Amino acid sequence: MEEGDKEFVVSVDTGGTFTDAVVLNRRGDLTAAKASSTPHDFSEGIMNAVERAAAKIGLPFGELLGRTRVFAHGTTVATNAYITRTGSKVGHITTKGMEDTLLIGRAMQKVAGLTDSEIRNIARLDKPAPLVPRPLIKGVTERVDAMGEVVVPLDLEEAARAVDELARAGVEAISVCLLWSFKNPSHERTIKELIAREYPRIAVSISSELSPTIREYQRAATTTINAYLTLKTARYLEDLEGKLAERGFRGSPLVMQSMGGVVPFREARERSVALLSSGPCGGVIGSLVMGQHQGHENIIVTDVGGTSFDVSLIVGGSPRYASEPVVGSYHLSMPMIEIKSIGAGGGSVAWIEAGSSLLKVGPQSAGARPGPVCYDRGGEEPTVTDADVVLGRIDPAYFLGGSIKLDKAKAIQAIEERIARPLSLTVEQAALGIIGIIDAKMADLVRNLTVGRGYDPREFVIFAFGGAGPAHVGAYGRDVGARIAVVPSTAAVFSAFGIASSDFVHIKEVSFPLILPGDVARIDELLADLEGKTIAELVGDGLGREQIYTERTMDLRYRGQVHEIRTPVPDGRFDLAALERILQAFEAIYEQTYGEGTAFREAEVEAVVYRVTGKGLRERPPVRSYATKGEDPGQALKGRRAVCWKELDGFSPTNVYEMDLLGVGNLVEGPAIVESVDTTVVIHPGQRARLDEFRNFIIEL
């Protein structure tokens, strides 16, 4: 066995339908495998996927795990528990008089996270069901003021009674969020110690440890959701870690966080809320890593699966973080990579709206069971995948490499009966309409995150992955005005690839509202303290100081405004000279976001949140490059088949290529279809694509 085969990096991304496993050796050779996800016990799907990858390599499962130096995981356990409302029974303790904060929420909570079409359905708008019913919310006598001074001491007897009442009510977890606790956490810590002493089996989350930032409701929501998810997530991670150890893995497994980096399982158990976007963040990091190899700093990240279309941005070589993350209509106070999603994927259902007789697509999905009609598993509603099959873009005999045979006749029948005949269209016109609508919805979301934020899509490349992304990026990418789309060689398992390439990340932040220039020495102390804590955690993860670097930012706004701008802070001592550079950067970002001339320093600038992001650089598996083979793709030509193109007014004989047989430098002129085992790339008339040195497909839109 060669040296590069002796050690492996294994990463697994658990999705709603499939669990993807990627195995990389030291040379950068990648082996991918898929298995069905197992919601009753996600660890089963993980073990199945890794075992299939081991079989492809030709190793026994235990031997592969025994040679694995890094095992990293993107999980949907926290998301699944939240969506299905299967978390813990939670009690909540807050400052007396503030018991209804979680129930009142915010004025915009009814529409938080909803699409425009959902918002317009006013009759159905309502706040989400509370995670904590009112009888399980207890107020305690205490008060800390805005400067962190104790105005009213904590009533220990009252706090003990509140904890006793919650314990008798059968709560499994308690969240604690007191007023101004981020300025002085002593009362929260006392309550945590009380619970740990009297009821050690009850999980406790306190806001001063989890989210020490201003805005009481967001802190309360973040802390409560963390308490709601902690026990289930911790049990899952412990169980998976045990199974991996039993089968031969000797390391400390890592899990992907919503902030875009990995941490050991043992740390993630206490911060379950940080796992709510665990899997999708892998695709963002994968795009960042591959973009660095290709020389791209501005990337539109798009992931099209069976149910959803996810979009994120990388700007100047860094992922964009959400200013106000929203999960299930709750606003959170937690660093999270911004990922916007809509119900648009291969399984999105096409339907006719009653009353208007307009063709609609999604957001409802056929899912994996029964799935699209062409799956022949009992589905009756036509979907995007059915339309792709009818139009000749997907080969019914080669879906997932031929492991699943699709029924084109049933797809035609469903579109004809449900869409074409009621709208007096041909089947092909109806199918083109379905595809046109879903592509337009995808383009709209991309514009929302680019043009709507002051970015020009022409200055970005689009990364398209997931099972259906490569089939649709030629349309939605062209629609938004992008010039280049990148289909990664690992498109169908790209999130797993990104997880394998992720560094350790810890983010520490704290609020200390201050009108600038303010107390410059105090700001320097705050940043130094955050930096020290961040470095200490990374050292605790086993990283050497030479592997660690930090980035500092501040959230700034003009006095009297509500929303802040995340602004970079230069390294070194924070003094008046550094402050001037920060203010100039703030004004430049502000004008990029809101328009030239909108900055107005005379209004005074306020610093709200101070933040340090610490990254521990792992030894990443190399991204393997390949020798150029020339432009002629003839050796990969599988044949020709009739494909329906809107640009050509109907069906036209179209070249079909086998992705694995293409060589680096091969140029494919559209219209064309490029097939691989787990995805299909659609190249429209007037477009062309080439395979780059990393075997990514580069489409000129």
Image (tube, grey):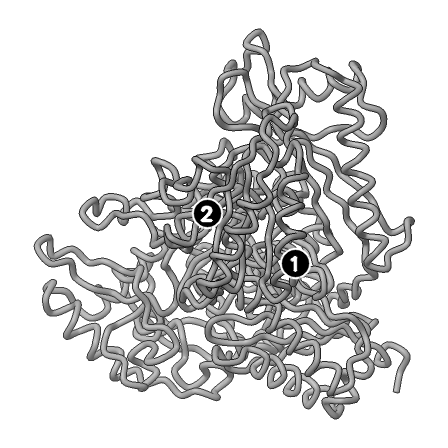
Residue 353 visible at all: yes
Q: Left or right: 657 with respect to 285?
A: left
Residue situated in front as seen by the camera: 650 or 140: 140
- Amino acid type shown at disc 2: Lys
Q: Is residue 612 depicted above or below 61 in this figure?
A: above
Q: Is residue 79 depicted above or below 603 in this figure?
A: below
Residue 225: % across, % down: 50, 54
Q: Earlier in the sequence, mark 1 or mark 2?
A: 2
Residue 300 visible at all: no
The residue that disc 1 covers is 196
Q: Is residue 305 depicted above or below 58 in this figure?
A: above
Q: Left or right: 364 with respect to 48?
A: left
- Amino acid type shown at disc 1: Ala
Q: Is residue 38 depicted above or below 555 in this figure?
A: below
Residue situated in front as seen by the camera: 571 or 58: 571
Q: Residue at x 17, y 74 (%)?
A: 416
The residue that disc 2 covers is 138
The reply to whether the C-beta atoms of the residues labelled 1 and 2 are less than 8 Å apart is no
Residue situated in front as seen by the camera: 44 or 635: 44
- The answer to which quarter of the image holds residue 181 is top right
Q: Residue at x 87, y 51 (%)?
A: 547
Which of the image's four quarters has the N terminus?
bottom right
Q: Residue at x 66, y 38 (%)?
A: 185
Mark 2 residue crowding within 10 angstroms, few (<14) / some (14–19) / many (20+): many
Residue 104: % across, % down: 36, 40
Could you say whether the residue bearing mark 2 is in a helix, strand or loop? strand
